[in-house]
Amino acid sequence: MLSQKVIENVLSAALSKGGDFAEIFVEDKLCTNIRLVGGLIENNISGRDYGVGIRIFDKLNCIYAYTNDSSEENLIKVAKEAAAALNSATTDLTLNFLKGSPRDINPIKIIPSTVDKKKKVDLMKRAYEVAKNYDASISQVSINYLDDDQRVLIANTEGVMAEDRRVRTRFSVASVASKNGEMQQGFYGPGASMGFEFFEKINVEEVAREASRIANTMIDAEHCPSGVMPVIMDNEFGGVLFHEACGHGLEAAFVSKGTSVFANKLGQQVASSLVTAIDDGTIPNGWGSTNIDDEGTPTQKNVLIENGILKSYLIDKLNGRRMGMDSTGSGRRQSYKFAPTSRMNNTYIAAGNSSLEEIIANTEWGLYAKKLGGGSVNPATGDFNFAVMEGYLVENGKILKPVRGATLIGNGLKVLELIDMVGSELSLGQGMCGAESGSIPANVGQPPLRIKSLTVGGRKEDK
Amino acid sequence: MDYRQLSQEILNRGKEKMEDLEVFIQNDKQIEIRIFKGEVDKYSISESGGLSLRGIANGKMGYSYTEKLDETSIDMLIDEAYENSKYIDSPDKEIIFEGSDKYEEFENSSSNLANTPAEEKIKFLLDLEREALTMDKRVASIQACAYQEFKSERYIMNTKGVDLADNNSGAFAYISVIVKDGEDTKTGMSFRIFKDLKEVDYKEMAKEAVEEGISMLGASPIKSDSYPIIFKNTVFADILAAFGSIFSADQVQKGLSLLKDKIGEKIATDIFTVVEDPFLPNGFYSKAFDDEGHKTIYKKIIDKGELKTYLYNLKTANKDGVESTGNGSRGSYKAPVTIAPTNVYVEKGDKTLEDLISSIDKGVYIISVQGLHSGLNPVSGDYSLSADGYEIENGKIKRPVNQITIAGNFFETLMDIEAIGNDLEFTIPMFGYIGSPSIKVKKLSVSGE
């Protein structure tokens, strides 16, 4: 993407006014995005993201600059402008690049750009027919097809020179059900670090049915009651619980500055002994998997919590300096427009022993959250919130009826201690995680589990 | 090659394959500074941009874009846009606009930020952080102390003769503090949006954030029930912004807005008026033309409770047989034309915040909500949001409240507005620059203990 000579010259310019570390990140990404609404292809856009980010560390200070113009002349100019923010003596630089042994945890069979767009469009139309005809209540269906082919080159003054290619495909269906002047929405959007062969793995008709099933269930649901109650969370996207409640608080960006509730708690019991939580950037073809992170460090499998004991944080280079700890391969960014920071890849709670049926059978009264929507957290306090997309009331060990419009709120440290049953069927769900270094693909996951008591925010029945 | 030349070249060559074409260019300059413990933690500068091409072939519109702005990209842009157009089967008429007769001339104050040296911006943040840290011994640390500045240039050129350019600039600063009292940890924040750093008083900002954090110490939930609610001005503005798509003609035409067939009907209480003013002095989305080159227009979206208009771009306006309202928007050069508001605000009323509070026997004053991207559904209007605030008893603020949710339906909430404050304030611009005064609502479900 850039010659070694150019890279050396840019890194030298970056350290021309002091600093002890410089990095260059080159990105070239092809994107395709097709949108279908009401059975008709409405938008079809493709393009090329291209740019270079330059980062300089001076001890714990970070300078970042980026540009679209990758001519050597401009890159050196940008590197010097960034360096000017330091304004001390030139750092001597001896560069000796070590090319790491390449690995390929996300083997790609069919590069999306080699596939006729008609095939992509046909998939969407097939899914539309199924989603629309699922039930008479389904009034509108929108489908998004997305593929990305991102090439990155990362080189730094520690001798890292690494390249990676990340191909990702996602297919999502949003169905709307209408009845009596009300509307409810169902969404399902699987994705993977795969090419067009992803569609050999997933069945678009099933994705469509699932989105319409949720909308059709929720249109007949009553409003969820309010109050504190046991909550059973199902697997797959239920993992957004751990992602919001704890995952963000384990990111070094907050821990290193002491602004996370999990700071200074390594080796301590922070969760129920039933809880083991892992962040693994190496799951083959996983939605959040990459060979190297966006700082050039190979990704790894990080055990964050083992049987309730806090074992590790998620660490990037800069915050690792602050903490005196090594990177865990967790430095990520949306694009060259963002300086990387510590982020999650594929995060999940490990499987336990109970079945979902047992968990429900052991619950006298509570909420069964089958599908969750998104959420957010304040890492300083650990207070989190997330939305329930598909929920049911449980009474006397049985599912009673669907309920809509619930939000779950709680505190990360407390909720981990309140997990009192963990199921056996682990599965992962795909999401986009937004934070300081942009919006990145991340898997969340868990087996079904129960939280002894949680605040459920619903609406009481009107009068 | 300069942009005009490059655009002309693309349009000329594109004409060989397509009927009409349009180039949209956006260039951004940004500066971001973050301070931590008296030092510059992050200093980021950037200059970047992209070019989008859209073109009509056989009546269908195809899009392409690139961030590699040079001659080598021209063929790729045209080929991709042409190829992409082939798969469009929406029957809606696509329009490359010939331009409006006249564009409003208005005073959009240019910012002085580019001439302010970086040292002054850094000093402002250092002062802000120190002020907040030393204001009260319960301030434990600073979660974020940051400054962001942008300058954005826009350029539209098409084969129908539109050739328009403008630019916009501004900055915002925010601070989030962590306060502790024993094990009790709370956060408080404040922000300012501005075009001149001199307008901003760091002492006031620090005080607001620290006072908010400290006022929340000792907070606990309130008993689950229905209560009268006062929304802080910027909180109601955030909620209105999150529900903004209900006014989009595109959502209405697709059956995704419950405001369908409601023009001329009452959708809110009599005292509720919502204005879009694209010419608002110091408005962050002030502009004379939209992203399709159509002139922007001052209008009331809701007038005394009555829905007056949807927001239109050219395509949706053509479909409804009306004029575009000048709300054609590209989220960026990577996105197709959709619909977005410019500067939109709820007209202020005549009550002070104290008047609103003193009118409530038992209720909650909400000062922040979380989960706007997830706990709120513009299609159904339902929302359930994590919230913080204060319990009101006998017309007075009694104590801080946290770990609660407020839930309702936005369309019902609009009909339940009982009083409007005189304290119009704009929130951090995301999809439009949205403002509101404090709003009192008859009742909402609160979930707590």
Image: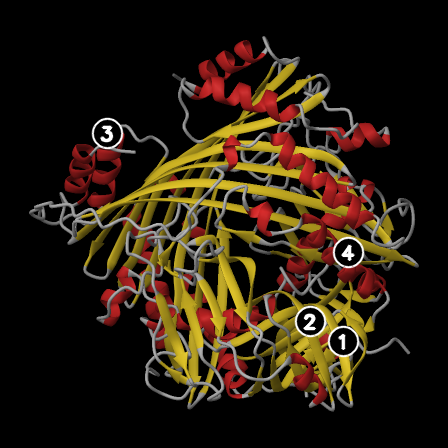
Left or right of residue A57, residue B173 in this image: right
Report which residue position mark 1 lands on. A392
Tags 2 and 3 touching, CB below 8 Å = no
Q: Chain of mark 2?
A: A
Q: Residue at x 60, y 12 (%)?
A: B17
Total of numbered circles in the picture?
Answer: 4
Disc 1 secondary structure class: strand
Disc 4 secondary structure class: helix
Q: Earlier in the sequence, mark 1 or mark 3?
A: 3
Badge 2: how crowded within 10 Å, few (<14), some, or many (20+)? some
Badge 3: how crowded within 10 Å, few (<14), some, or many (20+)? some
**Badge number at residue A144:** none
**Badge number at residue A212:** 4
Report which residue position mark 2 lands on. A370
Q: Position of residue A432 (x, y in %)?
A: 53, 56
Q: Earlier in the sequence, mark 2 or mark 4?
A: 4
**Amino acid type for the residue under numbered disc 4:** Ser
